[in-house]
Amino acid sequence: MGTDLARERQQAHDLLDKLPPEKLNAVLNLLEVMVEPLEQSLASAPVDEEEITAGTEEALRRARVSLANGKGIPHSDMLREFGLTK
């Protein structure tokens, strides 16, 4: 199976070398979407324009102060809170 994969990769490279520039760009875009679908989805997602409320702003301020003072929540506690560990 490894030999087939190597042969297929070489065949793909050979075909890419034969493409004219305008078609190469189209293939590149297709490959990027196939290889990195999440990254592409995130890049094209609309920006969330949700307003930050005064309460949320205050909570963020307290969290930043807490982190600056070295009082963050340990990673293990966060995992436990979300049921990812016991």
Image: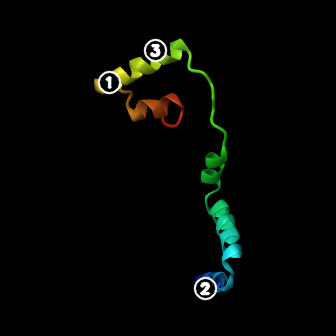
Quadrant housing the N terminus: bottom right
- The residue that appears at 67% across and 39% down in the rendered structure is 46
* Real-space Cα separation, disc 3 to disc 1, in angstroms: 17 Å
Residue 63's quadrant in the figure? top left
Q: Nearer the viewer, mark 3 or mark 1?
A: 3
SS at badge 2: helix
- The residue that appears at 30% across and 26% down in the rendered structure is 68
- The residue that appears at 66% across and 77% down in the rendered structure is 21
Lower position in the chain sequence, tag 3 or tag 2:
2
Q: Nearer the viewer, mark 1 or mark 2?
A: 2
The residue indicated by pointer 1 is 71
Mark 3 is surrounded, within 10 Å at the Cα level, by few (under 14), some (14 to 19) or many (20 or more) other residues, namely few
Q: Is residue 81 left or right of residue 42?
A: left
What is the three-letter code of the residue carrying label 1? Answer: Lys
Q: How many marks?
A: 3
What is the three-letter code of the residue carrying label 2? Answer: Gln
Mark 2 is surrounded, within 10 Å at the Cα level, by few (under 14), some (14 to 19) or many (20 or more) other residues, namely few
- The residue that appears at 66% across and 70% down in the rendered structure is 25
SS at badge 1: loop
The residue indicated by pointer 3 is 58
The residue indicated by pointer 2 is 10
Residue closer to the observer: 3 or 39: 39
Q: Nearer the viewer, mark 3 or mark 2?
A: 3
What is the three-letter code of the residue carrying label 3? Answer: Glu
* Real-space Cα separation, disc 1 to disc 2, in angstroms: 54 Å
Tag 3 and tag 1, C-beta contact below 8 Å: no
Tag 1 and tag 2, C-beta contact below 8 Å: no
